[in-house]
Image (cartoon, helix red, strand yellow):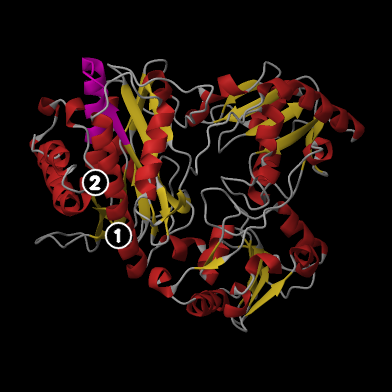
Amino acid sequence: MYQQFEETAQPEKGPERLDALRTQIKAEGLDGFLVPRADVHQGEYVAPRDDRLAWLTGFTGSAGFCAALKDAAGVFIDGRYRVQVKAQVADAYTPIPWPEVTLAEWLRIRLPHGGRVGFDPWLHTPSQISDLEEALEGSRIEILRCANLVDRIWQDQPGPPMAPVITQPMDFAGEAHQAKIDRLAKSLRSKGIANSVLTLPDSICWLLNIRGSDIARNPVAQGFAVLSAKGQVVLYMAPEKLGEVGETLGSSVEIRAPSRFALDLAVLEGPVGVDHATAPLAVVDALTAAKVETRDLPDPCILPKACKNSVEIEGARAAHRRDGVAMVRFLAWLDAQAPGTLTEIDVVRQLENERRATNALRDISFETISGAGAHGAIVHYRVTEATNAAVEDGQLLLVDSGGQYQDGTTDITRTMAIGAPGGEECEAFTRVLKGMIALSRVRWPAGLAGRDLDVLARVALWEAGLDYAHGTGHGVGSYLSVHEGPARLSRSGTVPLEPGMILSNEPGFYREGAYGIRIENLVVVQEAPAIAGGTVDKMLCFETLTFVPIDRRLIVPDMLTTPERDWLNTYHAECNERLAPLVGAAVRPWLDAATAPL
């Protein structure tokens, strides 16, 4: 099994670890210290060595941070983790709803007479710190660089990850790494940039057509790189991780030990591009100290990586077809089990077994969320041996899962009725479905961003006074991170959507203590066919990648408009057409019934 079920949160150890941290805070002459979830690469997922937030507080979510002061410790979490955090942190920590309450607002209240708050400049970006300093202007609160105080007290901190690197073949990458280097170097020259510092592992892996396993569920190798406008790359990665792969990168890629990275920054030719939104502040500090000219330049890999080429898109289609077969076989098995005979862990194991049976699974793309009843309302619920619940008659079961295949990354959520569903649940499910269909059907003028479309997924819920406290969709990599920037379908999504971007479409609704609903497909942005007489020059639309039946038992047909019903019936017909020849004779009757027209 890729997924394990041990309880990793240790809230009982939080108070003593907080006391030890406060001893270090006092020794440094500080009034507080910031502990982010992020590592030096600002990744959403981190290696065990970098899981400082979880080690200190017990909170295991993929986003958040702690502000530890002498007399208070706030754990800042967004809407996905409001329920989860309550069960994972001791009373010594106070959950803070973020961004509704900002760090600056909280610090002003807790330090009314000013104070000195330390942070590790390798774990925070220039933008984060400048925004915080601006928000604290006039408060007499200083934000000061210092050594990492958590590392000082973490006696058994694991070592850095050293997983081997593999090549991502052209059959899946669709573009040679030298062609990518040349393309991006040309872009740097056009901007007058001599060098660009790359700190995001998925950017580096995409650029060089390599993959790794330094981070669980994310096929990336950790390292840094510098891309020059001359078409050269210096890769700061342990040679023992690269092995023979290093020899295949060619003369344009020089490999150096990671320990040289900070030192080499001082001798770079400027101007040097640094992404202030993703790079560590320590990188800018090192360049500034050496009087090297810098510019705030978005990571040059982020947008090209997000806009998948035709080979990557075809790979995504193949991966979703394969994953769809596994999902259908799983759903047929689930329906055959009597209510009350399964647990949430049984569900996770069976689904992973179906994906493994494809003989193409490299890893799951994240820890499978298997939430029965009230657990479904915990947006990022992770079942453990301690929380494992029976899947009972009358409940909803929310399963959010995905696979890492060499030709693509999948992410799908389905919510299923166990036994006879209640009327409230069916109405809420249908409203969520209407939102998912609205996004699936939309055409929009080129140039719009995710924030312009997010509302479409919420209108049906808003009409009933309902909503969900997470974005509607995130970018997805090509055998890379399941959460990928820069585009997103959310109120904060400001990057224009472009052809080739793969995103999730996943509205939901959560009744705390009762049930959770989410329906998720992956979609890819494409150019929309022209409409005769239309006045908009270029329009875009979504192609659906995920084809797995949506539980008809939870749909209130009369709530759907004719176009919505037509979309669903067409979608289900296509599910059947694509998957029936592949699922096997025993499963085909279930698929026929699950995809019957409404």
From the viewer's perspective, is residue 183 above or below residue 33?
Answer: below
Say the numbered circle drawn on residue 568: none
- Residue reaching furthest to the bottom: 251
Q: Nearer the viewer, residue 419 or 115?
A: 419
From the viewer's perspective, is residue 367 above or below residue 69?
Answer: below
From the viewer's perspective, is residue 530 above or below residue 505?
Answer: below
From the viewer's perspective, is residue 86 above or below residue 285?
Answer: above
Whether residue 222 sits left or right of residue 589 in the image: it is: right
The residue lying at 29 percent from left, 39 percent from top is 330
Give the residue type that dot 2 points to. Ser
The residue lying at 38 percent from left, 64 percent from top is 308
Q: CA distance from mark 2 to mark 1?
A: 20 Å
Q: Which residues are magenta?
A: 414-435
Classify mark 1: helix, strand or loop: helix
The residue lying at 47 percent from left, 32 percent from top is 380
The image quadrant of residue 561 is: top left
Q: Nearer the viewer, residue 220 or 346?
A: 346
Q: Is residue 137 visible?
A: no
Neighbours of disc 1 within 10 Å: few (<14), some (14-19), many (20+): some
Magenta includes 420? Answer: yes
Give the residue type that dot 1 points to. Ala
The residue singled out by tag 2 in the image is 440
The residue singled out by tag 1 in the image is 318
Q: Position of residue 46 (x, y in %)?
A: 61, 46
Q: Nearer the viewer, residue 55 or 110?
A: 55
